[in-house]
Amino acid sequence: MSLNNWKNLNQEIIACRKCKRLVNFREKIAHYKTKRFKKWKYWGKPVTGYGNKNGKLIILGLAPAAHGGNRTGRVFTGDKSADFLIHCLHKVKLVNQSTSENKNDGLKMYNAYMTPVLKCVPPNDKPTSKELTTCFSFFQKEIKLLKRSKIFLALGKIAFDACVKFFKQINYIGKNDKMKFAHGVTYKINNKLTLIGSYHPSPRNVNTGRLNSKKMIALLKKIKNKIN
């Protein structure tokens, strides 16, 4: 793995302005902010991946959160979904601490890397098909650099479906292969890679009881056993 390759890729991601709708939206949020973060200088640019680049587990979100990653500049950082996810990852010793609040908080990931499939926050958390396809070029470059990756954990149905679409586009799976989302569902992509689905760690899922820490920790323990 070349550090220069990673540096070049991440610089390319951060400088991207290909999708006008996404550029306008992320910058609008960064300008107007939200009341509780008025004093923050928002990141307001595409968000790169973060973690152990030699990790076997790749944790995938659909996109940065408006006042999470789009504010802090780091994926799964600074919002309620991040709080829940990092707490669970810490319980199974995949990270060194139970919180993810800002870029300089000392978070380290063990055998895991996390990245958004779409690098910019989309309006209403719904990217267009074209926006996803445009951003797949970055995702494909990341996967090539993540040479030890073994398991892709997609958080939420939209992220899971985006991964399936991506793997079909790069011919890792057949165009007619049916892969249905469910929590804990597991599909072999090829001889090396496995795709696993999980409910998104959003307050909506956690508050309704669809997902709780016990359920998430159980899934993460199973995954950890597969990558050890």
Image: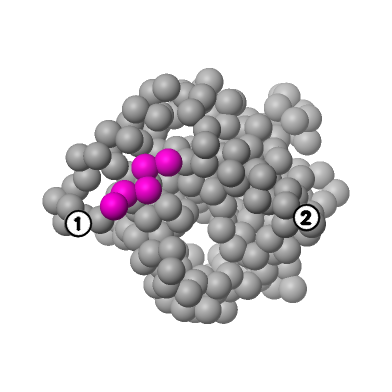
Residue 142, horizontal then vertical, whole percent? 68, 46
Q: Is residue 183 left or right of residue 145?
A: left
Dividing the image into 4 quarters, which one contains the N terminus? bottom right
Can you see residue 161? no
Q: In the figure, 63 relative to 91: above or below?
A: above
Q: Is residue 206 left or right of residue 98?
A: left
Mark 1 / mark 2, whichever is N-terminal: 2
Residue indicated by mark 2: 2
Amino acid at pointer 2: Ser
Residue 75, horizontal then vertical, whole percent? 47, 54
The magenta span reads: 41-45
Is mark 1 in CB contact (under 8 Å) with mark 2? no
Residue 46, horizontal then vertical, whole percent? 47, 41
Residue indicated by mark 1: 39
Q: CA distance from mark 1 to mark 2?
A: 37 Å
As drawn, the residue found furthest toward the right would be 191
Residue 149, horizontal then vertical, whole percent? 74, 56
**Residue 23: quadrant of the picture:** top left
In depth, the one of 164 and 6 nearer the eye is: 6
Q: Is residue 120 left or right of residue 204?
A: right
In the structure shown, which secondary structural element does the residue marked by tag 1 occupy? loop
In the structure shown, which secondary structural element does the residue marked by tag 2 occupy? loop
- Residue at position x 47%, y 24% in the image: 19
